[in-house]
Image (cartoon, helix red, strand yellow):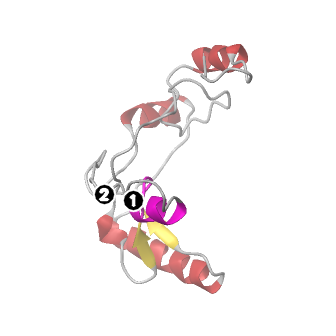
Amino acid sequence: MTVLYDKVKRRLQKAEIRYYDPSLEEKQSLVEAMANIADKCGITLYACCQDVLVRGYVQKARCVDGDLLAELFPDRPRVSQRRPTRKQCGCVASRDIGMYNSCPYGCVYCYANQNRKAALARFQGHNPEKDMLI
């Protein structure tokens, strides 16, 4: 049940960062402990694309949540068409306004940047007065 993107795995290996994919039982135990701590702090814990972890205090995550959008923007048409991007994704239809290779930070675990030099160039070339990223 590894959820790491292949390009992230390659970056971690190149950076000599070892990672461990716990067993399902270990994940469930860890998530239960995290959910109990979160609940005591008034925080809701969510799991994305891993329905096997959704139980008790753990809710299903939706990056693009139609119910929340309807609550935040009641005057707009409701978006209810499911459009999952991966297995067990709970998202509704949306338009991505982001752009790959545009973040200058270079985090090795990030799936959105493939080329740090390109990302830095795009970031440096961004004009905040314009409507577009580049």
**Front one among 3 and 61:** 61
Q: Secondary structure at mark 2?
A: loop
On-image quarter of the C terminus? top right
Query: Real-space Cα distance between discs 2 and 1?
Result: 6 Å
> Which of the 4 image quadrants contains residue 107?
top right
Q: Secondary structure at mark 1?
A: helix
84 versus 39 height, above or below: above
Task: Please give the name of the residue rendered at 62% of the width and 15% of the height, measured from the top-left corner.
Answer: 117
Q: Which residues are magenta?
A: 61-72
Which residue in the protein does label 1 denote? 66
> Is residue 2 found left or right of 130 in the rendered image?
left
Question: Any mark on residue 80, and which?
Answer: 2
> Which of the 4 image quadrants contains residue 53?
bottom left
Q: In this view, which residue lies farthest toward the front?
A: 75
> Is residue 42 found left or right of 59 in the rendered image?
right
**Amino acid type of the residue tagged 2 in the rendering:** Ser
